[in-house]
Amino acid sequence: MKKTILILTTLFQVCLLQAQTAFFSQVKIEYEKTVAVPALFREMEPSWFERIKDRLPQESKSYFEFIADNDKSVFKPGKEMPYDPRSPYQPMADKNVVYTDYSTSTSISQKPVFEETFLVTDSLVHIKWKITNDTRVIAGFECRKAIGILYDTIAVFAFYSDQIMIPGGPEGIQGLPGMILGMGIPRLHTTWFATKVEVNNVPVSLIVPAKKGKKTNRTDMLNTVRTAMKDWSSYGQKMLLAFMI
């Protein structure tokens, strides 16, 4: 009898805990993007790196805003950070605006590339995810780690929370059973982590796609950029990778 009471009490506590767990379908997130500049430069231009390494910042930070309502979201530049024009490092792909419709698995991305701005409409990038048992708390939410591969060659790690019921994340990274609050792409020596998450009074009216830019699809845009940077060696390859996500 005592054993039965103990089991029932435990089940009740589990059910109560689950009932107290809040789930959200609207959210506004601030992401901090961090680039390990020396490590990136060392791979992009080894000989040049040796000449300028003392002038490089240890890291570069920029901020982005993600707003979502059920099955739609927009990711865009957030608050501006001071930039030293004398620095040899210039941020890559830091002005992208990505609108995603998860119900139709499509996106509209505004991507400024040098003097050209592309407006890319296409299906969502397919990412092969493997969910692990590792967890981490980010911005007050418990997140589970996943390892992904996109374009069959680019590795990405991500931490997502199933409390936020939106399968999105920074840039065009998506496809997990919850919101990505932290992620990294080792080949770019870059991470994105949520610094602030708001679930009340979310400005959903701001979830609209960008309108300006040369209309194209992902394949044609990447081919154009690849051709323009064909003689740029590893530097061009890193820049192309930054525009691919």
Image (tube, rainbow, N blue to C red):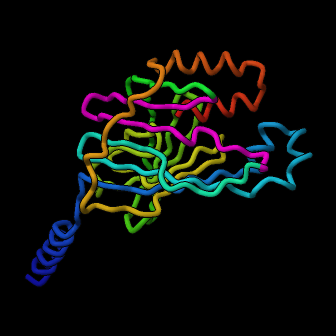
- In which quarter of the view is residue 97 placed? top left
Residue 44 on image: x %, y %: 77, 37
| Residue in the picture at 73% in, 18% down | 230
Residue 19, compared with residue 210, is above or below; it is: below
| Residue in the picture at 42% in, 63% down | 196
| Residue in the picture at 22% in, 64% down | 22
Viewer-proximal residue among 118 and 60: 118
Residue 231 on image: x %, y %: 78, 20
- In which quarter of the view is residue 91 placed? top right
Residue 122, compared with residue 206, is above or below; it is: above
Quadrant of the image containing the N terminus: bottom left
**88 relative position to 172: left or right:** right
Viewer-proximal residue among 56 and 47: 56
Q: Residue furthest left?
A: 1
**Residue 9 shows up from this direction:** yes
**41 relative position to 121: left or right:** right
| Residue in the picture at 38% in, 24% down | 123
Viewer-proximal residue among 135 and 102: 102
Magenta range is 86-114
Residue 183, compared with residue 150, is above or below; it is: below
**Residue 145 shows up from this direction:** no
**221 relative position to 103: left or right:** right
Tell how many labels: 0
Residue 136 on image: x %, y %: 46, 63
Residue 133, compared with residue 4, is above or below; it is: above
Q: Is residue 228 magenta?
A: no
- In which quarter of the view is residue 226 placed? top right
Residue 75 on image: x %, y %: 41, 44
Viewer-proximal residue among 36 and 228: 228
